[in-house]
Amino acid sequence: MMNCLQSWPEPVVRVQSLSESGIRAIPDRYIKPPSDRPGFENQEHVDIPVVDLKNLFSHDRTLHEETLKLISSACKEWGFFQAVNHGISHELMKRTREVWREFFNSPLEVKQEYANAPTTYEGYGSRLGVQKGAILDWSDYFFLHYLPVHLRNPSKWPSLPSSCRDLISEYGAEVVKLCGRLLKAMSISLGLKEDYLQNAFGGEDIGACLRVNFYPKCPQPDLTLGLSSHSDPGGMTLLLPDHDIAGLQVRKNGKWITVKPVPNAFIVNVGDQIQVMSNAIYKSVEHRVIVNSVKDRVSLAFFCNPQSDLLIEPAKELVSEDRPALYSPMTFDEYRLYIRTYGPRGKTQVEFSGSNR
Ligand code: OGA
Ligand code: NI
């Protein structure tokens, strides 16, 4: 690992502490250039597609195919959809989100025991990227490894609330199962064998991490972002948003669309690795998070990734003379070093790597 990634370049400031200190003006470090600030551009009356998964593997061929079509067009045109009837207990989703809210609401000293470093990012963090003097986002987070099992270390997960570790395990197992069903659906709708994507991710041994984002109330939400524009570097993300507060925005035709969370839905999005494997038939799409002055927001982003040392490249079946491979092989470990060094920067990486890697 590069030397510069061993520790943070500056003392870490917890955004939640800043927010709770009662400041009226946010420090300059969080003020975005005018072109990146939230604006009035998101007044569109459109939303990302909602896909009902009830019939995903129905024996009724027509219903099954209809669902696959909806997933496919959402992945091509939006890179995002909200999944309902996904099979995961709503009660489990709610309890898991609430236990994390309790963690973030516990005393600072408790959270500091889990303070993270940029070597692995595991633990309690407040920035993404290690560039000194970077403009920061208005959020704190907790990051942990769920799979592969040899990277899973529950002793690094919060021990309080006492149900936290068990809930992470139970929630993780359910989300990994759902991810498997979606990978199957995406493989079939790309015209690949149904286990293609799962195998390309490493079979049983995929990578999976959880990032729980905490977006504190912000006295000047018009000047900053909770999370800067980025596409997710991994395979596929299943996001559990807060139940009654919007915050996520998705970029569509150059405009920012604010997602209105459907109750109990998961927000599913395509990551850069599926864009690469599908030879850009499916797109990872830029998204960002806005904050507000009224309410804290918690979201759980569960990232399903290829095993970190596998070479990721476009599926041979999706490469032809007319549509040559747009990406050359690279491991996910090499790939994610970029966001871990420079922080979130739109889609620059997958676009850059398309012509140069
Ligand atoms: C992420 C992400 C969106 C949100 O964690 O990568 O895009 O609403 N989160 O928190
Ligand atoms: Ni994201």
Image: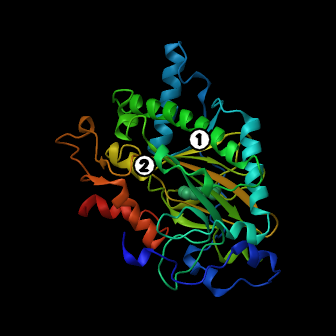
Residue toward you, 177 or 232: 177
Q: Amino acid at mark 1?
A: Pro
**Residue hosting label 1:** 49
Residue toward you, 327 or 303: 303
Local secondary structure at mark 1: loop
* Residue depicted at 25% across the width and 61% down the height: 357
Residue toward you, 118 or 355: 118
Q: With respect to residue 341, does 325 lie above or below?
A: above
Queried on whether the Cβ of the residue with tag 2 lies below 8 angstroms from ligand 2, the answer reads: no
The image quadrant in which ligand 1 is located: bottom right
Quadrant (top left/top right/bottom left/bottom right) for the N terminus = bottom left
- Residue 42 spot, x, y in % from top left: 64, 61
- Residue 222 spot, x, y in % from top left: 69, 74
Coloring scheme used: rainbow
Local secondary structure at mark 2: loop
**Residue hosting label 2:** 283
